[in-house]
Image (cartoon, rainbow, N blue to C red):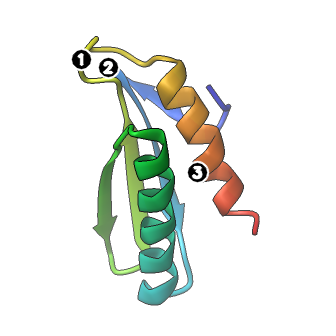
Amino acid sequence: MTDTWKKVSNSITKEFSFNNFTGALEFVNKIGALAESANHHPDILMHDYKKVTVTLTTHDVGKVTDKDTTLAKKIDSLTFR
């Protein structure tokens, strides 16, 4: 797990902040593309019009697995482009 993700119960979560709604929405769409290609889908919450909270867990085993940490790293890489 990357250091910036927080362990919460049986998941990892992270909040991302953007300058505006458009930036947040574009980020969510990029996450969607990553999730589809990995066939591993996070819970995504957009709030306060420019914040996105992502929560990852492997539902069928009820805990964080390599699928989650791999997707978390890919999501983190989106913020640096």
| Residue 56 shown left or right of residue 37 in the figure | left
Q: Residues within 10 Å of mark 1 (few under 14, many from 20)?
A: few
Mark 3–mark 2 Cα distance, whole angstroms, equals 20 Å
In the rendered structure, are the residues bearing label 1 and label 3 in contact, judged by CB atoms less than 8 Å apart?
A: no
On residue 9, which mark appears?
2
Q: Residues within 10 Å of mark 2 (few under 14, many from 20)?
A: few
From this view, report whether residue 63 is shown above or below residue 38: above
Q: At 54% from the left edge and 19% from the top edge, which residue is drawn?
A: 66
Which residue in the protein does label 3 denote?
75
x and y percentages locating residue 38 in the rendered image: 48, 40
From this view, report whether residue 55 is shown above or below residue 59: below
Q: Residues within 10 Å of mark 3 (few under 14, many from 20)?
A: some
Instruction: Return the disc, 2 or 1, that comes first in the chain's sequence.
Output: 2
x and y percentages locating residue 67 in the rendered image: 49, 26
On residue 60, which mark appears?
1
Mark 1–mark 3 Cα distance, whole angstroms, equals 21 Å
Q: Dot 3: what SS?
A: helix
x and y percentages locating residue 58 in the rendered image: 34, 23
x and y percentages locating residue 25 in the rendered image: 41, 78
Which amino acid does the dot numbered 2 rest on?
Ser
